[in-house]
Amino acid sequence: MLTEERYKLIIQRLQERGVVKLQELADLLGASESTIRRDLIDLEGRQLLKRIHGGATLLNQKSQEPGMEEKTFKNVQQKNAVARMAAKEILDGECIYLDAGTTTMAMIPYIEAKDVTVVTNGLSHVEALVSKRIRSYLLGGMMKIHTKAVIGSIALQNLDNFRFDKCFLGTNGVDVEMGYTTPDPEEALIKRRAHQLSGKTYVLADSSKIGEVTFAKLFDLKEAVLITESVPERSRRTIAQKTKIIEG
């Protein structure tokens, strides 16, 4: 089993149980205790877990994502500013992919382009788009309970039926070295595939996400245009060297 596969299974077991023992992980993964111990040291170094005597616990998880309701009320003004700028990038007649998430959701009231077609993996998004009489397609697949995002192999297969002029993706972390990241590897696969199928990719992130790193990488900064309301001065020069920034 590859190291990253072990890491994923360790995190999954921790999410299920909160605390796991070293021997339990060794039995689960078919690896030696010394190998599991090294894995835990590495994961602790990534701030994904806390080692305790004989095992590990998951605290302040980078691999857990707040629910849709919780995220809706965080950084509202900043998200609206980002969403307004992003909506201006949509031109008449374009086919776009709109990622699930509260910042992309906030784009919908600001879409003024005519004859636009939208594909999304967000249940709340498609409801809002249809209410605005925008032609919309919802990906099929498994729906995440907390975020109402459609993910999984069926969603990936659906996605391959489309090609996009532009896609608009949310992220939980923007880091010069680590790139764009999100807590859920399954959701990362959907975002990454949408990016690959698009002529141009925009990543929406309010300033609180800049400098953050979560569990699953989407792609490098240089592969997308970053839309944010403000880039902290400490990060402005290094980020601007990596990618184009649209800033309000």
Image (spheres, rainbow, N blue to C red):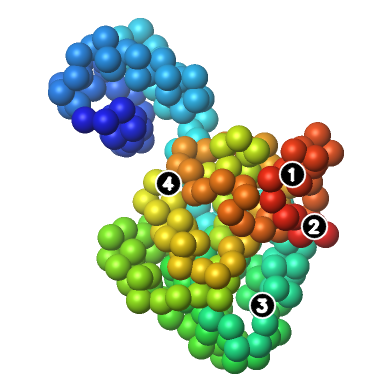
| Rendered position, 54 above or below 213 | above
**Residue 198, percent from left and from top:** 51, 69
Q: Amino acid at mark 2?
A: Glu
| C-alpha span from label 1 to label 2 | 15 Å
Number of marks drawn = 4
Q: For the point 33% across and 66% down, which residue is it?
A: 155
- Foreground residue, 94 or 170? 94
Specify few, some or many for label 4: CA neighbours under 10 Å numbering under 14, 14-19, or 20 or more.
some
Q: Amino acid at mark 4?
A: Asp
- Considering the numbered disc 1 on the image, is that residue within a helix, a strand or a loop? helix
Q: Nearer the viewer, mark 4 or mark 2?
A: 2
Q: Amino acid at mark 3?
A: Ile
Which residue is tagged 4?
184
| C-alpha span from label 4 to label 3 | 27 Å
- Foreground residue, 178 or 212? 178
| C-alpha span from label 2 to label 3 | 16 Å
Classify residue 234 by image quadrant. Answer: top right
Q: Nearer the viewer, mark 1 or mark 2?
A: 1
| C-alpha span from label 1 to label 4 | 28 Å
Specify few, some or many for label 1: CA neighbours under 10 Å numbering under 14, 14-19, or 20 or more.
few
Classify residue 33 by image quadrant. Answer: top left
Tell me which label, 1 or 3, sits earlier in the chain: 3
Which residue is tagged 2?
247
Evaluate if marks 1 and 2 touch, with contact meaning CB atoms under 8 Å apart. Answer: no
Specify whether residue 194 is in view.
yes
Q: Nearer the viewer, mark 1 or mark 3?
A: 1
Disc on res. 241: 1
| Rendered position, 144 above or below 161 | above
Q: Amino acid at mark 1?
A: Gln
For residue 227, side relative to residue 139 (left or right): right
Specify few, some or many for label 3: CA neighbours under 10 Å numbering under 14, 14-19, or 20 or more.
many
| C-alpha span from label 4 to label 2 | 27 Å
